[in-house]
Image (cartoon, rainbow, N blue to C red):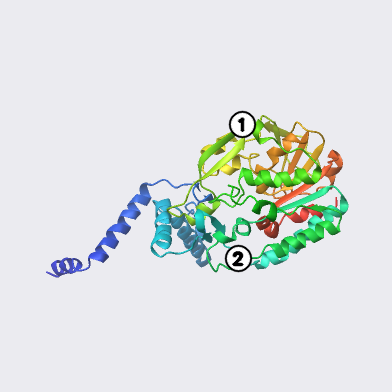
Amino acid sequence: MQQRKRKSGLIHYPVLMLAGVFFAGMFLLDCFTPDRAVSELENKTLTQRPPVTAQILTPAGLNSFFNNYTQYAKDQVPGRDAWISLQSFVETALLQKTQSGGVLLGAAGQMFDRTYGLVSSEERTLPRNIAAVGALAARYPGRVYVMVAPAASAVYPERVPAAAPLLEEQVYLDQIEAAVEANGGVYLPLRQALAEHKDEYIYYRTDHHWTTLGAYYAYSELCGALGLAPFDLAAHTAVEVPDFYGTFYSRARTWNAQPDTLTYYELDNPLTIYTVTGPGMPAEGETVGLYDLAKLDVYDKYAAFLHGNNGLSRIEGEGEGRILVVKDSYANSLVPFLTANYAQIDVVDLRNYNYGLDALIAENGYEQILVLYSFDSFKSDPYLYRAGIEG
């Protein structure tokens, strides 16, 4: 009789019953769904199931296990991509939010990084990086050229959601320019040059990089300063790759995002990726094509340029002389244009080149040294200081 009453009582709680069925179904689905190592859509590594060890018998070990398991359950929940998309739809379409996942959702489908000011780490890193490029310019007077790409929000302020108090980059760009120029270097401002082409497709909508066309206009500024004839776009075949969803989309996951188109120019210049084991020029490397075309078939298509962010690479060009490019990923879509002007383009990414630059410069005798970063990377990169180290 009691059992009959209990059963009839549950019927009066349909929400509780549905929740129970839902969680039971999710548990069973989880048991039969293989874990994923990486979420391509979010461009992140997913937590794997934590092992059960003897440490679980201690309070600290048990607490650590449950923390790790909670993150594992969150990362490996069945249908994770669909749940994230649903959340974004509710927030943006139904609740009319103008931001999602730390990304501002602007006009014309443009996405912007939500950067309202320098964080505490950047307040320390930015002055150190300004000093580093100043020191590099002082050691090689007349040979160092610095370009810092502004964020899309600085070029398209009218597309930024109303009343979004974004960081005023120009104040800091002026500080970088002053440090470079005071030490014998050349600073090439890009904000106005890019703004003159703002009606063209110069920044991706769903990614934090400039497009290949935006990179070309920045490259043209360098050619103007050096008296070089720019890469002839009309003389080369442009390849367009559709359906590119970038880093902003990975975070915002908006239901109505407009996919981008990635463009590259067919070039057969060899690129050697070196195995960096010490300062100076490494002895060993692997020679490949200029682009990693396999990346065009996966989510992170931008990684096709220069095969990503390698510590030291060398490209053989059709021009004369040598240039060293010290860069973040913004330069990856610009560097191919330099093949028209130089015989040798060496590319250093200080995130994966753990030494100073002097030995490398001494061995190769570069005519020019180009430092090219986005402002976002320049203010936050904890490795750019290496450019200022002597030796």
Which label's residue is closer to the chain start, 2 or 1? 2
Q: Is residue 102 left or right of residue 224?
A: left
Q: Amino acid at mark 1?
A: Thr
Front one among 360 and 207: 207
Q: Which residue is mark 2?
A: 166
Front one among 179 and 349: 179
Q: Nearer the viewer, mark 2 or mark 1?
A: 1
Percent position of residue 273, x then y: 70, 37
SS of the residue at dot 2?
loop
From this viewpoint, which residue is outermost toward the top?
A: 268
On-image quarter of the N terminus: bottom left
Classify 362 as above or below 173.
Answer: above
Classify 269 as above or below 377.
Answer: above
Percent position of residue 376, x then y: 65, 57
Q: Amino acid at mark 2?
A: Leu
Percent position of residue 307, x then y: 63, 39
**The quarter of the displayed image where residue 237 is located:** top right
Question: Which residue corresponds to the image point at 19% horizontal and 68% vertical from the top-left?
Answer: 12
Question: Which residue corresponds to the image point at 70% horizontal and 38% vertical from the top-left?
Answer: 337
Front one among 232 and 204: 232
SS of the residue at dot 1?
loop
Density class for disc 1 (Cα within 10 Å; few <14, some 14-19, many ≥20) is few
**The quarter of the displayed image where residue 165 is located:** bottom right
Q: Which residue is mark 1?
A: 237
Q: Is residue 34 left or right of residue 38?
A: left
Classify 247 as above or below 18.
Answer: above
Report if residue 384 is visible in the image: yes
Front one among 94 and 40: 94
**The quarter of the displayed image where residue 119 is located:** bottom right
Quote the CA–CA distance across marks 2 and 1. 38 Å
Question: Which residue corresponds to the image point at 64% horizontal and 47% vertical from the top-left?
Answer: 214
